[in-house]
Amino acid sequence: MHKIADVEIQHDIMVANSKLAGRNQKILDDADVFSVDVLGAIGSGKTSLIETLIQKMDHNIGVIAGDVISKYDAGRFEKYDIPVVGLNTGKECHLDAHLVKHAFGDLPLDSIDLLFIENVGNLICPVDFDLGSHIRMVVISVSEGDDTVEKHPLIFQNADLVVINKVDIADAVGADQDKMVADVKILNPDVKVIKSSLKTGQGLDEIISSLETFMKQ
Amino acid sequence: MHELSMADAMVKTVLDVAEKNDATEVLEVTIEIGKLTMLNPEQLKFLLDVLVENTLLEGAEINIVEVPVEINCNECEYTGAANMDDSDHYLAIVECPECGERNVEITAGRECNVKNIKIEKEEGDEDA
C-alpha cells in the first residue's frame, strides 16, 4: 500500500545565503576588517578604481577578486604586493557568501584592515546575494549609457556608495552625467553619489574620504 | 543567469528531504519566488524539468508561486503592498502607494523558497 504525505520544507536559498553572510561579517568584525563589496557592470572601472585606492589609501588592504575567470584581475592586484585571492565563479554571474567564506581562509585577515571584494561585472544577479561586507559600493560609467540607473533600480536601491565613473568622456559618448546622479537619488535619496574620472583624478579624494567615514562608523 | 545553479540547489534540497522521508515518488513541489528575486520563473521551470530527469522528482508537478512585493516606506511610514511599475521589463520599480516615493525598505518579494512537497511513500513508513 502507498500513502501520500505532505512534507513542509521551507528552505529559502536567499535566507540561507543571508545567514552565511551574517557569519562572514562576524568573522570580519572579529578580525577588525572593514569590507567593501564592489559591484558594477563589466568595464565600469571597478578593478582600476580598486588599484587606485590601493595606492592612495593608507591602510593594510586586501582584495578578493571575483570573476568568471579571476586570474587576470587577481594578477593586476598582486603587483601591489598585497594579499589577494582570486575567486573563480566558473559559470556563475555573481559571488555568494559561501564562496567568499572560502576566500577568507586564504587571506591573512589579522593583518588586513580594509578588504575590497570585487564582484562579478553584473548589475543584476549580485543584488540578491549579500556577502557579509559592511558596505556596497556600486561603480558605473557614463559609457554604459545615462539610462543605466533607471534600468537597474534594485542595485542602486541597495547601495551605500555610488560612483559614476569616466565622466571625462561623458560628452563624447553623449551621456548626461547629472541625469545619472538624479536617477540614483530618486531611488536612494540618502546615498552619496560621486562623479569620478580615474584619468583626471576627479572625485578620487571624495571616494577616499567617504570610505574613511564609513570605516569610522 | 543563475537560474541553473538555483534550480540545481532546489532539486538537491527536495531530493534530500524526499529521501529522508522514504519517498518512493515526489508528486508535487511548491516553490515561492519573490517578484523582485532575480530569477525568471519560465527559465527556472525549464531547467527544473531538465534536472529532475531520472530522479525521484521526474514527473512531479512543479508549482512556482510568485510572492508579491511588500514594503516599509522610509518617507511616510506606510507598510504593506507596494506599487509596481513593471510595464516595461521584468525588473520592476517599487514605489510607495501612499506617497509615491521609491525610498522604501523591501520586506517581501525577494524569496527563493522551496516551500513544500507532496510525496508518495510505502504505508507504514510515516515514522521515518
Image (cartoon, coloured by chain):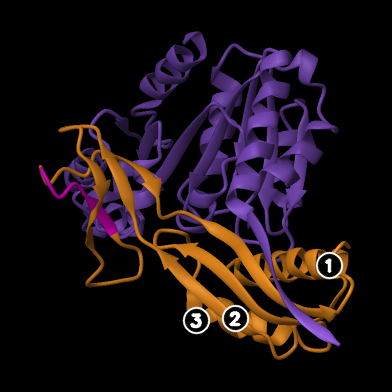
Chain colours: A purple, B orange
Q: Amino acid at mark 1?
A: Glu
Residue occupying the point 72% across, 64% down: B9
The span shown in magenta is B93-98
Distance of mark 2 from mark 1, alpha carbons? 23 Å
- Contact between marks 3 and 1 (CB within 8 A): the answer is no
Name the residue at the top extreme. A216
Helix, strand or loop status at disc 3: helix
Q: Amino acid at mark 3?
A: Glu
**Chain at tag 2:** B
| Percent coordinates x, y for residue A141 in the rendering | 37, 48
Mark number displayed over residue B62: 2
Q: Is residue B68 above or below residue B117?
A: above
Same subunit, labels 2 and 1: the answer reads yes
Distance of mark 3 from mark 1, alpha carbons? 35 Å
Residue occupying the point 45% across, 55% down: A123
Residue occupying the point 37% across, 37% down: A163
Residue where numbered disc 1 is placed: B126
Q: Earlier in the sequence, mark 2 or mark 3?
A: 3
Q: Amino acid at mark 2?
A: Ile
Residue where numbered disc 3 is placed: B42
**Chain at tag 3:** B
Helix, strand or loop status at disc 1: loop
Is B96 magenta? The answer is: yes
**Chain at tag 1:** B
